């Protein structure tokens, strides 16, 4: 059966403007590496249909003060620059007509974010998250052009221009085992040498992490968190999203781990709807009706089936693994898409993800007292050693 909506208003969508990408990153969850031909761009008529559908009260609810969010996604969204411009123009007109508010953001691999494009986006208060896997050596290991050449230098050339004008430009790091070994040094260098202030990271769960990797990651994270809380006082632009998310959830009740399948959806080039961008695989050519993780189509509506209801019902389901986990109130069941990719069940947490999250929480608790940036009240010999390490690093930097 097909229904008009999920029973909750959708406030944010990603649109795949193109499935093409000029990179072939080794860990890409879209599985684009398994496709050897040009993938499609969205048709303009479909793009407008998606925007019309999103602004419909049946989908996004009646006008309120919450802005509707359109995220440019792909593939590499900047390969479809003409369609970014079309989206902005059409959605802004639609917002005016429906008395809704709309804002735009997105993600890019950064290779095509030239000064001209950045200037236009910045003027319109549109900020794109740039994927950057650390310093040149770590970044170029996985993030390469189709011809195999590393992309670090090209991205940095664009980022130098951007960061001079917009110090809060965010970057997202895919936390691989290799990066975990030197995580503090990598962020430290990006922050001090390259002047990057805003970081997001997400763990790459497709790799097999060893016990030694987790131990090293914990040591690195301790240095990083200590560095973060001391430097943040001096530079308010410094922001590590993962730390801030856990800190903000210290005393706040969350219902869902994220908005996927409830307030947030991903729409692909052909109009099919997914609970989030990670559920859409580019190597799957079945129709939207046939794909298990596709929950509908903008032209027809939502499938009223078991899978599409799992997300809204996830607050009633505590997996056994989460029952005794101290992070549960701040995490719920992790990332539905990672769980599905690894265990074919959105309610079955991925063990690499869980260990990383438990380490993050442990480190934050160790250094924060009563949820304040007040680390030095809990001084132990170990903390003094880490503190000395960070201090030395900083004084070497100043020399
Ligand atoms: S860390 Fe893992 S076990 Fe703990 S709440 Fe999150 S998903 Fe559940
Ligand atoms: S399911 Fe995972 S990838 Fe998708 S929106 Fe939620 S946290 Fe992000």
Image (cartoon, rainbow, N blue to C red):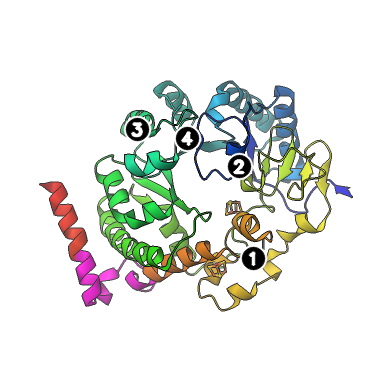
Along the polypeptide, which appears first: circle 4 or circle 2?
Answer: 2
Distance of mark 4 from mark 2, alpha carbons? Answer: 14 Å
Disc number lying in front (1 or 3) = 1
Q: Which residues are magenta?
A: 365-387
Image x and y of residue 274, in percent = 70, 46
Q: Secondary structure at mark 1?
A: loop
Residue sitting nearer the eye, 379 or 277: 277
277 displayed left or right of 144: right
Along the polypeptide, which appears first: circle 4 or circle 1?
Answer: 4
Q: Residues within 10 Å of mark 2 (few under 14, many from 20)?
A: some
Q: Which residue is mark 3?
A: 156
Image x and y of residue 246, in percent = 46, 63
Residue 119 seen in this snapshot: yes
Image x and y of residue 182, in percent = 31, 54
Image x and y of residue 169, in percent = 39, 39
Residue 109 is tagged as: 4
Q: Which residue is mark 2?
A: 30
Residue 71 seen in this snapshot: no
Callouts 1 and 2 close, C-beta under 8 Å? no
Magenta segment includes 377 = yes
Residue sitting nearer the eye, 212 or 187: 212
Q: Is mark 1 within 8 Å of ligand 1?
A: no
Q: Which residue is mark 1?
A: 348
Along the polypeptide, which appears first: circle 1 or circle 2?
Answer: 2
Disc number lying in front (4 or 2) = 2
Q: Secondary structure at mark 4?
A: loop
Q: Secondary structure at mark 3?
A: helix
Q: Secondary structure at mark 2?
A: loop
């Amino acid at each position: 059966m097909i229904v008009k909506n999920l029973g909750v208003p959708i406030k944010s969508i990603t649109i795949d403007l193109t499935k093409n990408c000029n990179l072939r990153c080794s860990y890409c969850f879209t599985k684009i590496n398994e496709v050897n031909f040009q993938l499609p761009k969205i048709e303009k008529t479909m793009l407008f249909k998606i925007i019309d559908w999103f602004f419909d009260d049946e989908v996004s609810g009646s006008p309120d003060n919450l802005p509707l969010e359109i995220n440019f996604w792909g593939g590499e969204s900047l390969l479809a620059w003409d369609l970014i411009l079309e989206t902005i123009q059409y959605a802004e007109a639609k917002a005016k007509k429906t008395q809704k508010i709309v804002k735009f953001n997105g993600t890019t691999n950064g290779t095509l974010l030239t000064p001209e494009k950045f200037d236009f986006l910045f003027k319109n208060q549109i900020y794109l998250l740039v994927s950057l896997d650390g310093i040149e050596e770590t970044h170029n290991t996985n993030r390469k052009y189709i011809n195999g050449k590393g992309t670090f230098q090209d991205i940095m050339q664009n980022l130098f221009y951007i960061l001079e004008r917009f110090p809060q430009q965010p970057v997202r790091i895919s936390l691989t085992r290799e990066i975990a070994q030197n995580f503090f040094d990598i962020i430290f260098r990006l922050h001090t040498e390259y002047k990057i202030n805003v970081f997001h990271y997400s763990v790459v769960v497709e790799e097999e992490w060893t016990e030694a990797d987790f131990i090293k990651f914990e040591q690195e994270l301790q240095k990083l968190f200590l560095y973060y809380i001391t430097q943040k006082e001096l530079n308010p632009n410094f922001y590590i999203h993962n730390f801030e998310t856990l800190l903000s959830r210290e005393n706040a009740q969350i219902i869902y781990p994220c908005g996927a399948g409830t307030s947030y959806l991903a729409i692909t080039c052909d109009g099919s709807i997914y609970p989030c961008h990670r559920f859409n695989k580019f190597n799957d050519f079945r129709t939207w009706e046939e794909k298990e993780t596709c929950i509908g189509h903008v032209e027809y509506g939502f499938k009223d089936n078991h899978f599409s209801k799992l997300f809204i019902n996830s607050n009633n389901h505590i997996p056994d693994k989460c029952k005794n986990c101290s992070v549960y109130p701040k995490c719920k069941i992790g990332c539905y898409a990672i769980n599905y990719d690894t265990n074919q069940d959105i309610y079955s947490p991925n063990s690499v993800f869980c260990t990383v999250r438990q380490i993050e929480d442990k480190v934050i608790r160790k250094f924060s007292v009563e949820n304040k940036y007040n680390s030095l009240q809990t001084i132990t010999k170990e903390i003094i050693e880490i503190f000395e390490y960070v201090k030395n690093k900083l004084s070497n930097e100043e020399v």
